[in-house]
Image: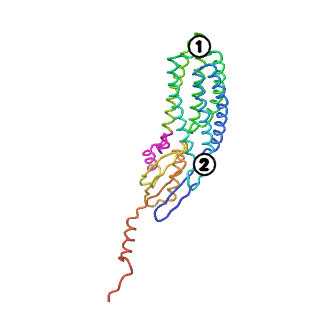
């Protein structure tokens, strides 16, 4: 619901979108299920990697370990976002989801670097690998990751937190595929160097996705303009589409979590246009045309003449006329 206030300084309008509470609740459940699946199978994959000597399995288990933590953090971020705003956190805790998304991207980078280092060591001195048991564990891991990916894939694409969770599970899925291929090659040829090679390939594949996630999350944390919103074009649209708007300036666009867009702006009106009506029209245009659910609008009045009269009053220029005798 919007709130308009007018005083001698100007008029301000605030609008708050209802948000996607149903999407948030659904995404929260999806992430929790994926976290339980990932964490549960991660233990089995660590045991399988140690018993078979497979780096591909251990690398995938490393993915799943960080992913289980990341998914748990993603769930907790959704949980925090449900809390109402407070006097100290006036926007609530929605930005925690963006912070977790950035942390998830960074975690993927660290895991990928460890995999590349370990792969180089094993490529120089390949250890024995048991292809048969490795294949069984990898197939089970693939099944778990496919289920987890399908669960998360039905969630919101606008939430950076959800995108971070999907990236983690996608990395696990690719790791399981690499382990399956490596196991088949080892069983057929006995060439164990395929194991570290495919592990590095998976690490490289997920690095670009992790980088894109980190870049998007950093853009939100730095309060950059949301994708698809141009400050100058929005100002021009308001000036040309709403009669009585003389000028739109001081426009700032940002997002708390990458999904809910916000704006602040100043508007200068032509004579005869009511400030409260202008605020309502601008707010409606921002919501329906540009998808901005929260807007703070300040109306600038030209007070120069009135301020001049007030200064004169203070100096006594316009006080009661004195009668000459």
Q: How many marks?
A: 2
Which residue is farthest left? 325
**Element marked by disc 1:** helix
Which residue is farthest bottom? 325
Q: Earlier in the sequence, mark 2 or mark 1?
A: 2
Judge whether 63 appears above or below 78 on screen: above
Q: Is residue 269 magenta?
A: no
List the residue tagged with mark 1.
186
Viewer-nearest residue: 171 or 279: 171
List the residue tagged with mark 2.
18
* Residue occupying image coordinates x 58% and y 11%: 190
Q: Position of residue 160 (x, y in %)?
A: 55, 38
Q: Is residue 226 magenta?
A: yes
How many neighbours does mark 2 have within 10 angstroms: few (below 14), some (14-19), or many (20 or more)?
A: few
Viewer-nearest residue: 196 or 8: 196
Residue 175, quarter of picture: top right
* Residue occupying image coordinates x 56% and y 35%: 164
């Amino acid at each position: 619901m919007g709130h308009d206030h007018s005083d001698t300084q100007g008029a301000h309008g605030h609008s708050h979108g209802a948000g996607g509470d149903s999407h948030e609740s659904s995404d929260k459940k999806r992430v929790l299920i994926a976290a339980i699946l990932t964490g549960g199978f991660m233990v089995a994959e660590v045991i399988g990697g140690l018993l078979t000597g497979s780096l591909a399995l251990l690398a995938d288990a490393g993915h799943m370990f960080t992913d289980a933590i990341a998914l748990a953090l993603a769930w907790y971020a959704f949980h925090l976002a449900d809390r109402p705003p407070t006097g100290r956190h006036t926007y609530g805790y929605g930005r925690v989801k963006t912070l977790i998304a950035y942390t998830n991207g960074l975690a993927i980078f660290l895991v990928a670097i460890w995999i590349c280092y370990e792969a180089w060591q094993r490529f120089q001195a390949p250890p024995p690998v048991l292809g048969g048991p490795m294949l069984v564990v990898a197939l089970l891991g693939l099944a778990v990751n496919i289920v987890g990916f399908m669960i998360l894939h039905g969630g919101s694409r606008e939430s950076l937190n959800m995108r971070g969770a999907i990236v983690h599970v996608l990395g696990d899925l690719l790791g399981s595929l690499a382990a399956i291929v490596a196991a088949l090659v080892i069983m057929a040829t006995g060439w164990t160097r395929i194991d570290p090679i495919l592990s590095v390939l998976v690490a490289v594949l997920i690095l670009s996705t992790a980088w894109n996630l980190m870049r998007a999350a950093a853009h939100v944390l730095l309060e950059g303009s949301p994708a698809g919103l141009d400050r100058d074009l929005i100002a021009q649209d308001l000036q040309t589409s709403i009669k009585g708007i003389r000028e739109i300036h001081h426009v700032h666009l940002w997002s708390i979590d990458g999904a809910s867009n916000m704006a602040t702006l100043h508007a200068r009106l032509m004579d005869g246009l009511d400030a409260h009506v202008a605020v309502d029209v601008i707010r409606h245009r921002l919501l329906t045309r540009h998808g901005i659910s929260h807007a703070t609008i300040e109306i600038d009045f030209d007070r120069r003449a009135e301020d001049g009269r007030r200064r004169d009053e203070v100096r006594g220029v316009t006080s009661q006329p004195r009668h000459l005798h």
